[in-house]
Image (cartoon, rainbow, N blue to C red):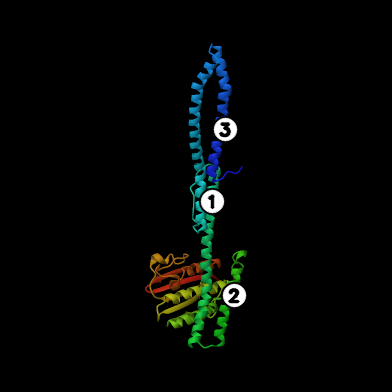
Amino acid sequence: MRLPGSIGVRIAVAALAVALVTLAIVTVGVIVFGGNAFMDLMTAHGETAEDARSMFESTVLVVLIVALVVAIGLATALAIAAGRWVAQPLRDLGGAARRIAEGDYGAQLDRRGFDELASLTDSFNQMSTGLLEQERMRREFIANAAHELRTPLTNLKGYLEALRDGVMPADRATFESLWDETERLVRLSESLDRLEEGPRPSARTEIDVSRAVETAVALARPSATVRGLRWQLDLPTSLHARADPDHLAQVLANLLQNAVRYTPEGGTVTVRAEEQRDDVLVSVLNTGTTIPADDLGRVFERFYRLDRSRDRRSGGAGIGLAIVKQLVEMAGGRVGARSERGTTTFWFSLPKA
């Protein structure tokens, strides 16, 4: 038979039923078997059957009835307490599950109750922690994907604005640059489609860093021209390193976009590349406000922004430099930054070809 109500009510009813059955058995045993034994004993000692029955009813039955009433009351109280003790952790579990359903993935429960409930609580807390981590990864992925898509779109927008305003001629070189950025967007969208296959490893090949820098500067130039920024390039004719072409384009685009964003109007952006003993060093310098030393050590942290009053639209999402660091280290290089006397420099190195 299925009992109605919560599990606490069911446990209370079951416990009370067991207690009542036990009391019924005791009562039947006392009245039937105990009563006959009492009458036989009293008769053997010279009492009549009527007197023996009267004595039994006035003593044993009264005590039995009082004991039954007290026992039923205690059994009821204990059954209710046991039901609540069992049901409360389950009610807490249900409340925490509703909080997770509403988006609070950090809901956790205190470990209490008997072993089975404690094990269920541990499993629930483990699930909650996993969901919270999945939500963090989802948000991080959305921010990364938005940033990856934003860079080529910003370059395309700068070119189109320059073409619209007549700042740049509509020549073959301009259309080739637009085509390259469009192709890059296509590759990004294809990589998003292949996410279930895991991250794509860095496809390092020999690449001309000087040419890659010139291409990246050409893409960033329209948005810098609108703000009246000056460019200075210090590049050798040819400089070869090993890197993933798409990753290197993303690194250069992020650094140049960052420099253009934070260089005041009329300022200067300088890009240098040089060959060192074991690697190739690329530096992006821009004039503007000096970054405090305490902040300089954290600029490559994910979601870290120098000015917390900036929103993502005006100051970025705080992941561009973190992406730069990740991509450069995947290629076997290093990154760094320095800022002094109104000039800020971000640099990275790549292994020589």
In this view, the residue farthest toward the front is 50
**Distance (Cα) linking label 2 and label 3:** 77 Å
- Front-most of residues 189 and 168: 189
Residue 159 position, x and y percent, is 51, 82
Image quarter of residue 269: bottom left
As drawn, the label of residue 64 is: none
Query: In percent of the image, x 55 and y 27: which residue is there?
Result: 27
- Secondary structure beneath dot 3 equals helix
* Kind of residue indicated by mark 3: Val
In the depicted structure, whether residue 105 falls above or below residue 275: above
Residue 3 position, x and y percent, is 58, 43
Q: Is residue 296 visible?
A: yes
Task: Give the residue number, with chain letter if any, for mark 1.
Answer: 124
Task: Kindly indicate whether the residue at mark 2 contacts the one at mark 1 (C-beta within 8 angstroms).
Answer: no
Mark closer to the observer (2, 3): 3
- Secondary structure beneath dot 1 equals helix
Badge 1 or badge 2: first in the primary sequence? 1
Image quarter of residue 202: bottom right
**Distance (Cα) linking label 3 and label 1:** 38 Å
**Distance (Cα) linking label 1 and label 2:** 41 Å
- Front-most of residues 228 and 316: 316
Mark closer to the observer (1, 2): 1
Task: Give the residue number, with chain letter if any, for mark 3.
Answer: 21
Task: Give the residue number, with chain letter if any, for mark 2.
Answer: 186
